Amino acid sequence: MPLTKHLITAGLCVGILNLTSARCAELDSGPLIDEFKLTLASGWRMEALGPLLSYERLETRTQWTLSPLLSHAFDQGTDVEEFDLAYPLLTYDRFGTEYRLQILQVLSFSGGQDQQEITQSRFTLFPLYFQRRGSDPTERP
């Protein structure tokens, strides 16, 4: 049993050293820490404790997860951001100026601009209440 404890400690130390130093090679410490290049896209992924903790870096996209509680992804190239907290408890999605925040898929806030650059915001308490507000004075009641 003490040998296992020392091996786990050594694996954690190697993983921490690899994170803080320049990345020059892949790291493979079994399910404890694993770093590898992606095959379908240019980038790399690091996983710790199996797939429970992960960090992924592609050309313009970064993503980290603490499964199954948290996940966050951001793509600078397309200006897309996604955040989930204990899905479907809380979700947030943004694409440019358009956004949507949902709580339990029942309470929803969303908004953004349409093709004419008119700002609109929406609020939904599904299935009881739906509201839309816009900055265009011709659409106001």
Image (tube, rainbow, N blue to C red):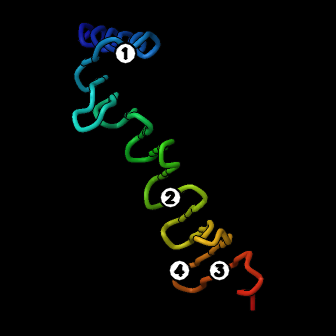
Q: Identify residue for label 1.
A: 15
- Check disc 4 and report the residue beneath it: 126
Of the image marks 1 and 4, the number of the one nearer the N terminus = 1
Q: Position of residue 46 (x, y in %)?
A: 34, 28
Pointer 2: what residue? Answer: 91
* Amino acid of disc 1: Gly
Q: Quadrant of residue 61?
A: top left
Q: Nearer the viewer, mark 1 or mark 3?
A: 3
Distance (Cα) linking label 1 and label 4? 46 Å
Residue 115 x/y as whole percent: 58, 70
Q: Is residue 48 visible to us here?
A: no
Q: Earlier in the sequence, mark 1 or mark 2?
A: 1
Q: CA distance from mark 2 to mark 3?
A: 20 Å
Which part of the image, by quadrant, shows the N terminus?
top left
Identify which residue, 8 or 83, lies in the foreground. 83
Left or right of residue 80: residue 7: left
Q: In whole angstroms, how far apart are the C-alphas of marks 4 and 3?
A: 14 Å
Q: Is residue 68 above or below residue 93?
A: above
Badge 4 marks a residue whose secondary structure is loop
